[in-house]
Image: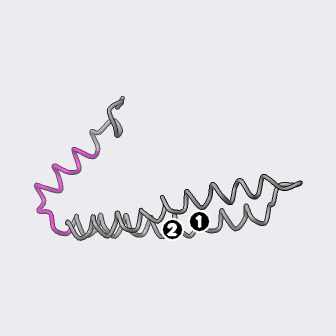
């Protein structure tokens, strides 16, 4: 399970790196006489690729975790995930 979550967080870290790059590209696209639609298209294409990769990583990690849990553990985790009202201190 530890390896699966480590791999997942490594993959998701690329989203954080892209956020920084995206801000720069957004500023550059907006700072021209006309909105640079080509740059925006490239930005969103990168996002699409990263999100597809992130989705695969999440599903892969969850499958690995699912495989190592016994039925009772899966049931407990299922209830815990399903009962959560959200993340962070301001859950509803």
Main secondary structure type of the part rendered in magenta: helix
Position in image of residue 59 (x %, y %): 36, 66
Q: CA distance from mark 1 to mark 2?
A: 6 Å
Determine if the magenta segment contains residue 47.
Answer: no
Query: Which residue shows up at 32% across the image and 32% down it?
Result: 89
- Structural crowding at the residue carrying mark 1, measured as other residues with C-alpha within 10 Å and reported as few (<14), some (14–19) or many (≥20): few
Q: What colour scheme has been applied to the protein in the rendered image?
A: one colour
Q: Which label sits on residue 48?
A: 1
| Quarter in which the C terminus is drawn | top left
Left or right, 49 with respect to 3, comes to right
| Quarter in which the N terminus is drawn | bottom left
* Stretch of the chain drawn in magenta: 67-81
Query: Which residue shows up at 27% across the image and 39% down it?
Result: 83
Task: Please identify the quarter of the rendering in which residue 65 is found.
Answer: bottom left
Secondary structure under tag 1 reads: helix
The answer to which of 79 and 62 lies nearer the viewer is 62
Relative to 36, residue 79 above or below: above
Whether pointer 1 and pointer 2 mark residues with C-beta atoms closer than 8 Å, the reply is yes
């Amino acid at each position: 399970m530890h390896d699966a979550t480590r791999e997942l967080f490594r993959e998701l870290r690329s989203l954080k790196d892209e956020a920084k790059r995206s801000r720069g590209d957004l500023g550059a696209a907006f700072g021209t006489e006309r909105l640079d639609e080509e740059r925006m298209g490239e930005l969103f294409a990168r996002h699409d690729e990263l999100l597809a990769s992130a989705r695969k990583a999440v599903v892969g990690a969850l499958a690995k975790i699912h495989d190592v849990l016994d039925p009772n553990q899966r049931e407990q985790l299922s209830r815990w995930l399903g009962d959560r009202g959200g993340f962070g201190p301001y859950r509803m």
